[in-house]
Image: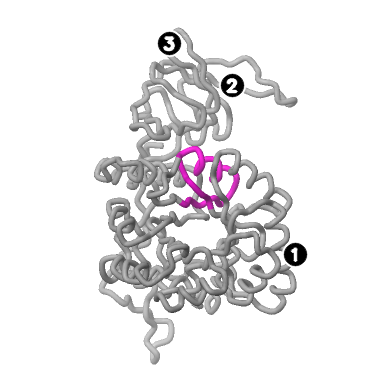
Amino acid sequence: MRTATSMELLAPAGGWEQLKYAIHFGADAVYLASDRFGMRQRASNFALDELARAVAYAHDHGVTVHVTCNTVMHDADLDELARYLFAMRDAGVDALIVGDLGAFALARRLVPELELHVSTQASVSNSGAAKVWHSLGAKRIVCARELSVADISRMRAELPEDLELEAFVHGSMCMAYSGRCLISDYLTGRSALTGNCTQSCRWNYTLEEEKRPGEHYPIEEDAHGTYLMNAQDLNMLSHLDELKEAGVDSVKIEGRNKKAFYVATVVNAYRQVLDGADPNLFQAELETVSHRPYSTGFYFGPAHQAYQTDAREQSREWAAEVLDVEKCAGGYRAEVLCRNAFTMDSELEVLSPRREVRAVELTAIEHLPFAKDGAVLEGYEVERANRAMEHYALTTPVELAPHDILRMHKLPPAQI
């Protein structure tokens, strides 16, 4: 449970699975979207009719829910927004993340019981702007990503005590100021400002000489061109104390387009460090999930681009999710849902909340087939779990628990 003096850990929940794993691995709060007005329209967002169930699940686990309502608004959007706001209120949402001034005013008038958080899309970069938002009813400011730790500290000193500050600490960065980018819209007709970004900044670009149509030249001297706008990923795991000292109330992990394996791993690392663990012991955990080269963004100086390539690194992959566990003669028998193929000899590890990562040795694998009516048929031993999203039973001397994640070293494609 978060103490009065600690920072809130705010995690992304792009769908049901991500929501459950964010909570299981220690998030204090989650942020998500319904089917409109969110900046990540490709995520598995929650339909309006299932939002109340998602909020109830979070509240049952002591976790608050923030809903994004931060796209650029047009008059046609405002006409529909009122119905959406009432649905948020009726679902029991705790806070709305809003970037548009008109939408903010409408929410303040129609659903005054909901906290209003000012999105990073509003680019709040100074105490004057923050004070204006506070005077209009804002409970929290999501700091512009371009602020340094010193900038945040300076701003915090000028703000009312009841105005909270939230800051991104991990995940993808945008090449445009606070995410306000027009490249995707220009090149593909899919606007980033309405949540449909194609991540055009990650693409490989070359130059075409004006007098030689069709002839392309790399911008940098490289056989593959250059990714000159491809921002490095943010990683502030080792600098949470500096953010706390600067006055940050909530630290936010980016990633509503990310899968549950990513969410669980990153949330677990930040939870353990916030609870007092040495960040040096958990930096390696952040290498296990898909990521671009890491940096500290703008917090200690200019941000940098990964201009050589958009290739991502990842040292582990999800082998299975633990569904149920019982003690047996060989230690523990765990029913699992297979995610990626593994064998008796695979180098498996288990990720559990608030525990160290442990190696897992298997002594048996059983396939658990299902009949058409959903009944579990009698299992049979196999040497390899290779049917994704099917059930298996694993016997191991290592203690496991429901919702643990079994992962394995990521192999080169030729060895899979």
Q: Amino acid at mark 3?
A: Gly
Residue 321 in the image: x percent, y percent? 50, 32
Residue 15 sits inside the magenta stretch: yes
Query: Of the residues under marks 1 and 2, which one precedes in the sequence?
Result: 1
- Residue annotated with mark 3: 330
In this view of the protein, which residue sits in the foreground, 265 or 316? 265
Does the rendering let one see residue 191? no
Distance from the alpha carbon under mark 1 to that under mark 3? 56 Å
Asked if the residue under mark 2 is in contact with the one under mark 1, i.e. CB atoms within 8 Å, the reply is no
Q: Label for residue 368?
A: 2
In this view of the protein, which residue sits in the foreground, 290 or 158? 158
How many marks do you count on the picture? 3
Q: Amino acid at mark 1?
A: Arg
Distance from the alpha carbon under mark 1 to that under mark 2? 46 Å
- Residue annotated with mark 1: 83
Query: Of the residues under marks 1 and 3, which one precedes in the sequence?
Result: 1
Q: Residue at x 37, y 37 (%)?
A: 415
User: Element at badge 1?
Assistant: helix
Q: Residue at x 37, y 53 (%)?
A: 291
User: Magenta span covers which residues?
Assistant: 10-30
User: Element at badge 3?
Assistant: loop
As drawn, the residue found furthest toward the bottom would be 211
To which quarter of the image does residue 284 belong? Answer: top left
Closest to the camera, between mark 1 and mark 2, is 1
